[in-house]
Amino acid sequence: MSLSLSACILLLKEHHLLKSSAVQNNIGTDMTGISYDSRKVAGPTLFFCRGAHFRPIYLAMARDNGATTYVAEKPYVEGNGMNALIVVNVQKAMAILSAAFFDFPQDDLFVIAFTGTKGKTTSAYFTRGILEQAHPKHVALSSTIERIVGPNPDQHFRSKLTTPESTDLFRDMRTAVDNGMTHMVMEVSSQAYLKNRVFGLTYDVGFFLNITPDHIGPNEHPDFANYLHNKLQLVVNSRKVVLNAETANFDEVYAAATTTTNPDSIFLYASAEFQPERSDITIDFRFESLKLDTNESTFKLVPVTDKAAALNVGNRYTLSLIGDFNESNATAAIIGAGLAGVDGSKAAPGLANVLIPGRMESLTVPGHGTVFVDYAHNYGSLKALFSFLKKEFPESALNVVLGSPGDKGVSRRPGFAKVINESVATAYLTTDDPGFEDPAAIAAAIDAGIEHDHVKVVTELDRAKAIAQAIAANGATDILVVAAKGADNYQKVRGVDTPWAGDLNVVKQVAAQLED
């Protein structure tokens, strides 16, 4: 891979991003590397000065390591002797130039993208499961949990961000194409648009699953309007759009979709009993639950309109991943795969056995009830999870272990208190990626909104001890949810990814000790 300085200038001008340029050598000289991390620069490299924590010394280090051109929003003396491209927005410039450096790999992939406050990961895994049934070892994935860029185990990587930085994303796409991948399923966070990680990227199919207040705080979105605006950018940048007709703010979502997409390429889905408030829209797909318990669920998907019937995905489907809320996620996945050319006969077996690390994993502990481990990490996802469990176990007390991340997701904390008040008997407040915040202060912020007259609260900041206490105290018929971290094997503490055994592993260790 390489990119010439002249090509960079032309692309930046084309997107109205270039403010000025200073060329020190031959404008046609190729750069064979691209990076925003000075430690990864080797040889003639295009280097980006970006991020809130950027320091000019990083540019000096990149220059010393061989970088020949830098892109920044202002000149730096540390870049003297290098080519300088001064731009309006360095994150947008990085996305545009990264796509070009890796020779626009998205053009060689059928890209299906999901956004939503909850359900992105599950829907993405369901979709990949279906596509893999039709195209074995040809489906890449970019998710909160992992990135898959090839068919072999060593081409699966743990994710650090829901949506990677643009340079990393386009590198993954190029690697996937080179490894023979033909399709890619990806999650797209609101932060990806807020920080322009996917600027200029167009998806073949884009999904809007739902929205509830989240990611609002000092280091994230300033308010809900900004959060919604960034979520809507996915549907604006998709060739075909699939919308959950039951989402909040549906009018704004549908209006955004129609700004760039013909209504014939917009598909709506909803549960069988849902009645839209608007008379000018038609639901294209309806799903109806047929059987639901803690082992599996069966539902049917019914195409309603002619364009829905043309996808040939109407069928009965079975899920191993329990929860009535997952039938909606599975419906989205089936429609997405249908738009990629996979019919119901392939979708049903592809969907049936999909399991997701950290999603609705359970363990029965003799004498101490049933423990569920799930990534649910905001009001909407916890509300859906608790509602399902209360229906399945109406006579059981529901208890929870959870914490809230530091440095972000500040808006989640009152939401956690609200959902605890609605459903929980005992809440164990603990540590969950505290970052640079005090874990005790985070727990106290959640605790402040809990109604102590009917909810017992235990604060134990050592997560392993909190899980052990909760299981030991859980009654024989009680339900315990260990929420938010799922299969994560680290805790983010003061800028360091501190090793963590993983919630399910800790649950298993505690269960084994109780049986001894």
Image (cartoon, rainbow, N blue to C red):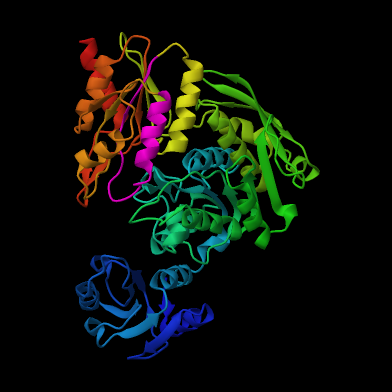
The residue depicted at 59 percent of the width and 55 percent of the height is 235
| Residue 400 is inside the magenta segment | yes
Measured from the top left, where is residue 156 in percent x and y? 39, 46
The vertical placement of 101 against 346, above or below, is below
Left or right: 148 in relation to 470: right
**Residue situated in front as seen by the camera: 152 or 427:** 427
- Which quarter of the figure has residue 474? top left
| Residue 3 is inside the magenta segment | no
Q: How many marks?
A: 0
**Residue situated in front as seen by the camera: 358 or 41:** 358
Question: From the image, which quarter does the N terminus lie in?
Answer: bottom left
Measured from the top left, where is residue 163 in percent x and y? 42, 53
The vertical placement of 164 against 503, above or below, is below
- Which quarter of the figure has residue 292? top right
The residue depicted at 48 percent of the width and 41 percent of the height is 118
**Residue situated in front as seen by the camera: 480 or 123:** 480
Measured from the top left, where is residue 15 in percent x and y? 52, 77
The residue depicted at 61 percent of the width and 23 percent of the height is 298
**Magenta span covers which residues?**
397-423
- Which quarter of the figure has residue 268? top right
Q: Residue furthest front?
A: 453
The vertical placement of 197 against 483, above or below, is below
Query: Does residue 337 show up?
Result: yes
Measured from the top left, where is residue 220 in percent x and y? 37, 55
Question: From the image, which quarter does the C terminus lie in?
Answer: top left
The vertical placement of 355 against 336, above or below, is above
Left or right: 343 in relation to 432: right
Query: Does residue 179 show up?
Result: no
